[in-house]
Amino acid sequence: MISFTKRTAFTCVFMLIILSSAIPASCAASPDNSEMSAYIIDYMKAEYLDENLVHPARTELCAYARSYMGLDPLEEDDSVIKIATPNIVKAEAFYDYYVGIFSHLSNMPLMQMTSTGSLIGQTAESYEVSEDNTAWTFYIKDDMYWSDGRKVTPEDIEFTFQYIGTKIASSEWIGESLVSTSVSDEDNSVTFVFDQPYTNLNLEFATYNVIPKHIWENIDDPEGYTSSGPYVGCGPYYLEEINLDSAKLTYKKNPHWKGTEPNFENVEIHWFASDSVACMALESGSMDTYYRYANSYPYANVDELLETGDFDVDRQTSIGLTFMAFNLESEPLSDPAFRNAISYAVNYDEIITYDTNGYGQVPNKGFVPPGMDYYKNTDALEYNVNTAKSLIADAGYVDSDNNGIVEDSEGNDITLELLIRDGYDDTAKLMEEYLEDAGVDVEVTQVDSSTWFDRKDNYEYDLTLSGATPWGMLMHAGWGTGYLDNRRTGKGVLHILGDQEFLTLCDNILATTDQDELEQYASDMQDYYATEMPILPLYWKEVVTPYNKHFTGWHYNPLFGIYNLDTFLNVKQVAAA
């Protein structure tokens, strides 16, 4: 039953259709009469009959009406906030890696992380989990709308995870472990049941973008699908265009957004070929802020940017870090004593100075940074090349021919290949120098990212340098386990650990619902890292983010830095002082 108010409005708008149909098409500007009638009918059905269908927003209908009546359009809002990044988009594709990260703004995940690291709903209002952590129910916010006017439904959420779990390689674990799904229109919820406990599914679901079923159900190969846009989104903005020629992503206000109104009509992400070029763009004043996923503004450029007088910086301790990983199947790196010995060869203070310009901290053997839950203060890593040499000899590796290189059990000089990608050149040179000072020969091999992924997955290296992102430290069983568990796959995943002690700890963390048990398992995991040393942390770091002084309202969270919903709903321009 339509209420009196809705019925009256419905009748009035319907009369407009009748009147508009009587006007000769020659008197009307675009859209034509039939299109205008269709726009109005769809709008009425959605607004007054609560039908879930694609329809124009009120502002769009107003623009159509002005055009129809031959009136000048309203002045267009061209306000924009411009973000510089070295994260290069490689394809006109929604599932391009960095498009996916930037589109958290347009296709908001179910959950989000707060500035203190707690998890709250984003597309979801709230959630419930069963006692055994196998069944998770998410209650979807009732005022969420796609940018084409359709309402976000539990079926969209159900579809999203069924779809990516079978069609997106990095999300295959969802399809493999998901037993069943169900939706309830009555309480606007969707329930996922898994074949094993997932203690941190709420965290996992803070990273997967929600997609509209009515669009993507017609696309069979999402990773191969290309389009410059627009892409339908449900956030305060939608992705209007991917422009590879101008190296820019453009996000426009979602006309159907019901939440807090953003202060800017557009958000532009401009990517640059290198950090140095991105820094020049900020220094020139053409960009308003800088964002590099899981990384800081280049430390060496901070002072120069501040000297312009137009920027301030936000400093936050990161739970990400830089580390050196060992191929545990390769001798002598399979020997924990050897791994512990070479940890003393690294000049941590020097590498922090070179790599972070002092925005770093010497890590502990327990790997896990202080900002993580249940951090344990294990022994700090220490630089002492004489101790390194002594421990290498104690482990049975000696330089019998006095050529400066220690030998393996068969009398061969130990030469380790250090495999790196672009961006790790300077760190690799330091590591080469440090290890050779301790009597271990190192050959550095630099490859492109694709080759690095292939060789890493096939264990074709001895040592490699990599970085742990905040999400990487939290994923899987947390505390960095997602990088190491050999049952996992992924571009950044090293999957080098398969011993039963480690795997049992991971499974216990994933299964427990008891916080005291979780704290103990976290402690045990850090002790395991400190004793076995499967990876060598090189430094814990700060994230430095610059922003134009003429803008205020920036928010930071440990997972995605300043690139989060709170920032885009609150950032605004302020008058110059």
Image (cartoon, rainbow, N blue to C red):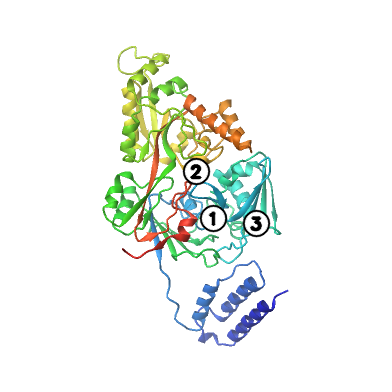
Residue 522 in picture, x, y percent from top left = 54, 33
Report the amino acid beneath label 1: Met
| Residue where numbered disc 2 is placed | 471
Mark 3–mark 2 Cα distance, whole angstroms, equals 26 Å
Comes first in the chain, label 2 or label 1: 1
Q: Residues within 10 Å of mark 2 (few under 14, many from 20)?
A: many
Q: Is residue 92 left or right of residue 390?
A: right
Residue 12 in picture, x, y percent from top left = 63, 83
Query: What residue lies at 60% left-to-right and 44% top-to-bottom?
Result: 201
Comes first in the chain, label 3 or label 2: 3
Which quadrant, please, contains the N terminus?
bottom right
Report the amino acid beneath label 2: Trp
Report the amino acid beneath label 3: Pro
Which quadrant, please, contains the C terminus?
bottom left
Q: Between 42 and 12, which is closer to the camera in this rendering?
A: 12
Q: Is residue 359 left or right of residue 559?
A: left
Comes first in the chain, label 1 or label 3: 1
Mark 2–mark 1 Cα distance, whole angstroms, equals 16 Å
Establish if 518 lies above or below 162. Answer: above
Residue 286 in picture, x, y percent from top left = 32, 59
Query: What residue lies at 32% left-to-right and 24% top-to-bottom?
Result: 436
| Residue where numbered disc 1 is placed | 108
| Residue farthest toward the top in the current orientation of the protein | 400
**Image-quadrant location for residue 203:** top right
| Residue farthest toward the right in the current orientation of the protein | 1
Q: Are marks 3 and 2 in contact (CB under 8 Å)?
A: no
| Residue where numbered disc 3 is placed | 154
